[in-house]
């Protein structure tokens, strides 16, 4: 049995990965930070019990997903961002990466919430289908079908097609 990780150590080790996943889910940094803060606040009060299970990372991911899906159900959909933040100066050769990032987020936003959650966990967090199913509280078959539908939609999304290979 592994030695329990302190909450402080867990936050220090995993906060950037949690923030990255939250950003992919929410679409903006402020909401992502709110989601991570809300998630960590919820798990902090149960940290002793969570570390006894030997899977704090999976538990925290599940709390983040259920929190985000709950936000999606409760929040009004008429909220709009107030504008785009200016980009930092790019180094030479980073243009393609920046272009992909600016295309990826709107394409992810076009997916339904459960499909977006599956894509983020499966491909950006690099979790197995079983781990994604555990994080979302659903069956592995549901993960597979949601993933297939999401990937089919992303494959035909004009924001993600390469204009150099498709005239």
Image (cartoon, grey):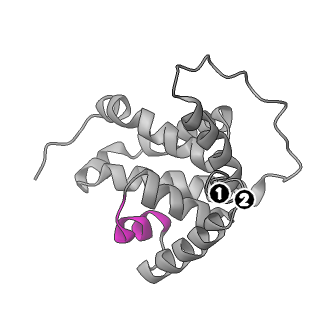
| Residue 11 appears anywhere in the view | yes
Split into 4 quadrants, where in the image is the C terminus? bottom right
Pointer 1 local density, CA inside 10 Å: few below 14, some 14–19, many at least 20: few
What residue range appears in magenta? 127-136
Residue pictured at 27% horizontal, 34% vertical: 6
Residue 114 visible somewhere in the drawing: no
Q: Is residue 70 left or right of residue 54?
A: right
**58 up-or-down from 85: above or below:** below
Q: Are marks 1 and 2 in contact (CB under 8 Å)?
A: yes
Residue 65, magenta (yes or no): no
- The correct choice, above or below, for 31 with respect to 63 in the image is above
Residue 161 is tagged as 1
| Residue designated by label 2 | 158
| Marker disc for residue 68 | none
Q: Position of residue 49 (x, y in %)?
A: 31, 51
Residue 100 percent across, percent down from the top left: 60, 43
Q: Is residue 162 left or right of residue 122?
A: right
Viewer-proximal residue, 127 or 75? 127
| Label 2 neighbour load within 10 Å: few <14, some 14-19, many 20+ | few
What distance separates the C-alpha of mark 1 from that of mark 2? 5 Å
**Predominant SS of the magenta segment:** helix
**In the image as oriented, which residue stretches furthest toward the front?**
167
Secondary structure of residue under mark 1:
loop
Single out the residue that lies furthest toward the right: 78
43 vs 31, nearest the viewer: 31
In the image: residue 9, left or right of residue 18: left
Left or right of 163 on screen, residue 1 = left
In percent of width and height, residue 47 lies at 35, 43
């Amino acid at each position: 049995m592994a030695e329990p990780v302190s909450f402080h150590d867990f936050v220090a080790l995993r906060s950037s990965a949690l923030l990255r996943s939250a950003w992919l889910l929410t679409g903006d940094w402020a909401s992502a930070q709110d989601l991570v803060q809300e998630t960590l606040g919820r798990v902090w009060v149960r940290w002793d019990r969570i570390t006894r299970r030997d899977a704090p990372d999976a538990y925290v991911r599940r709390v983040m997903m259920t929190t985000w899906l709950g936000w999606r159900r409760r929040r009004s959909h008429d909220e709009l961002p107030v504008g785009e933040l200016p980009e930092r100066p790019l180094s030479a050769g980073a243009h393609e990466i920046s272009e992909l990032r600016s295309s990826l987020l709107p394409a992810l936003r076009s997916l339904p919430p459960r499909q977006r959650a599956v894509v983020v966990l499966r491909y950006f967090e690099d979790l197995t289908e079983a781990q994604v199913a555990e994080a979302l509280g659903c069956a592995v078959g549901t993960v597979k079908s949601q993933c297939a539908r999401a990937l089919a939609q992303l494959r035909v999304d004009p924001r993600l097609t390469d204009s150099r290979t498709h005239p």
